[in-house]
Image: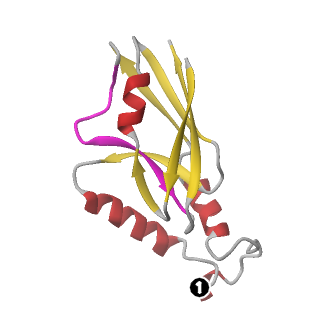
């Protein structure tokens, strides 16, 4: 089984899409997710307290600020705006693929775990996540 999930983003932040992945879990195996872009990432993260997502976004923004921040003056890839190269750096630091066990047709996620696309760009995008289930 293979599928593509399309996710609309409206700017930087974490977008949970666990509910869109659950129906794809069948039988037993491993569900692999792979984001088909170089300026966003995938995460499994807490989905109970939205402050977790807010703090993660704030941390990575502080760690890798936009290229118009004086601390980032060394960057040369700035053609697509001040958030472009920092988005590539964040995507290089964070996972772009995830593997989730499927047991008896259910994702083996923990109680507070959700699946997120972490958008690193400022403007809206339509992101694609390839999903494959192998047994």
Q: Residue 101 sits in which quadrant?
A: top left
Which structural element holds mark 1? loop
Residue 34, compared with residue 65, is above or below; it is above
Circle 1 Cα neighbour tier, 10 Å, few/some/many (<14 / 14–19 / ≥20): few
- Please state the horizontal and vertical placement of residue 46, each as a whole percent of the image: 29, 48
Specify the principal SS of the magenta part.
strand
Name the residue tied to disc 1: 69
Residue 50 horizontal/vertical position (percent) = 27, 58
Left or right: where does residue 60 sit relative to residue 72? Answer: left
Expressed as whole percent of the image width and height from the top left, the position of residue 13 reads 44, 61
Q: Is residue 38 above or below residue 132?
A: below
Q: Which is nearer the eye, 35 or 97?
A: 35
Which residue lies most toward the bottom here? 70
Taking depth in this image into account, of 118 and 75 the one nearest to the observer is 118
- Residue 1 covered by magenta stretch: no
The relative height of residue 111 versus residue 38 in the rendered view (above or below) is above
Q: Is residue 32 above or below residue 129?
A: above
Which quadrant of the rendered structure holds the N terminus? top right
What's the magenta region? 106-120
The residue lying at 48 percent from left, 25 percent from top is: 31
**At x 24% / y 42%, what residue is drawn?**
112
Residue 114 inside the magenta-drawn segment: yes
| Residue at image location 35% in from the left, 16% down from the top | 105
Q: Nearer the viewer, residue 38 or 71?
A: 38
Q: Residue at x 66, y 68 (%)?
A: 84
């Amino acid at each position: 089984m293979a599928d593509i999930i399309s996710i609309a983003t409206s700017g930087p932040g974490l977008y949970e899409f666990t509910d869109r992945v659950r129906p794809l879990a069948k039988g037993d195996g491993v569900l692999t997710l792979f984001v088909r872009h170089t300026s966003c990432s995938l995460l499994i993260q807490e989905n109970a307290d939205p402050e977790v997502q807010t703090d993660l976004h704030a941390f990575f923004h502080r760690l890798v600020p936009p290229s118009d921040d004086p601390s980032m003056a060394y960057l040369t890839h700035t053609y697509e705006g001040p958030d472009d190269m920092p988005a590539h750096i964040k995507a290089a630091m964070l996972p772009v693929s995830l593997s989730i066990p499927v047991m008896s047709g259910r994702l083996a996620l923990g109680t507070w775990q959700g699946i997120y696309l972490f958008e690193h760009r400022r403007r809206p995008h339509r992101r694609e996540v390839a999903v494959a289930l192998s047994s």
